Image (tube, rainbow, N blue to C red):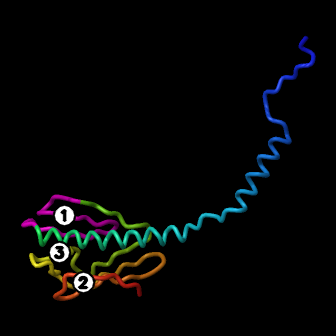
């Protein structure tokens, strides 16, 4: 006989309340995602990538006959080899501004020294940096102001 069997197609109120209570406890235990910290990490990662790209272009200038350089644009920069072969393109994180202070190219001579030594100002949402390309040197550094 079918009188004792019940049709259970959904959840009981007690089961739903138990799941919601467990979920709310888990959400309280974990801190909220800090977007400010994520943006700072992205900026730091971008600056490290920029440093590696400059060193890469320097090694290309030392080891190959083709001219290699970095060209800075408003929202990104490109690495070129030769006259127009693009090796890489990197976009700036949101809120970052790079002021090349005149010359938009970063290039080296065959000895690995900078052709146009200068300081490039990098402004982010959280800090201001100077990328210093020294006269007569093959290295550069990025300093936070």
From the top left corner, tell me how far across and down residue 63 is, in percent: 11, 69
Is residue 116 magenta-colored? Answer: no
From the top left corner, tell me how far across and down residue 137 is, in percent: 19, 86
Circle 2 Cα neighbour tier, 10 Å, few/some/many (<14 / 14–19 / ≥20): many
Badge 1 or badge 2: first in the primary sequence: 1
SS of the residue under disc 3:
strand
Q: Which residue position holds label 3?
A: 107
Residue 28 as seen in the image, left or right of residue 76: right
Residue in the image at 34% along x and 81% along y: 142
Observer-nearest of 92 and 51: 51
Q: Which residue position holds label 1?
A: 80
Observer-nearest of 30 and 129: 30
Observer-nearest of 25 and 32: 25
Badge 3 or badge 2: first in the primary sequence: 3
SS of the residue under disc 1:
strand
Spatial distance from mark 3 to mark 2, Cα to Cα?
11 Å
Residue in the image at 43% along x and 76% along y: 124
Q: Looking at the figure, which quarter contains the C terminus?
A: bottom left
Circle 3 Cα neighbour tier, 10 Å, few/some/many (<14 / 14–19 / ≥20): many
């Amino acid at each position: 006989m079918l009188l004792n069997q019940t049709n259970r197609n959904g959840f009981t109120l007690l089961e739903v309340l138990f799941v919601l209570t467990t979920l709310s406890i888990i959400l309280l235990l974990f801190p909220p995602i800090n977007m400010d910290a994520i943006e700072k990490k992205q900026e730091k990662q971008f600056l490290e990538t920029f440093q590696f790209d400059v060193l890469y272009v320097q090694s290309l200038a030392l080891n190959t006959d083709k001219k290699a350089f970095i060209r800075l644009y408003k929202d990104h920069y490109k690495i070129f080899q030769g006259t127009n072969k693009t090796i890489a393109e990197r976009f700036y994180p949101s809120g970052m501004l790079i002021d090349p202070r005149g010359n938009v190219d970063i290039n080296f001579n065959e000895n690995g020294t900078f052709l146009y030594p200068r300081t490039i100002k990098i402004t982010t949402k959280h800090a201001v940096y100077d990328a210093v390309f020294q006269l007569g040197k093959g290295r550069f550094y990025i300093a936070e102001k």
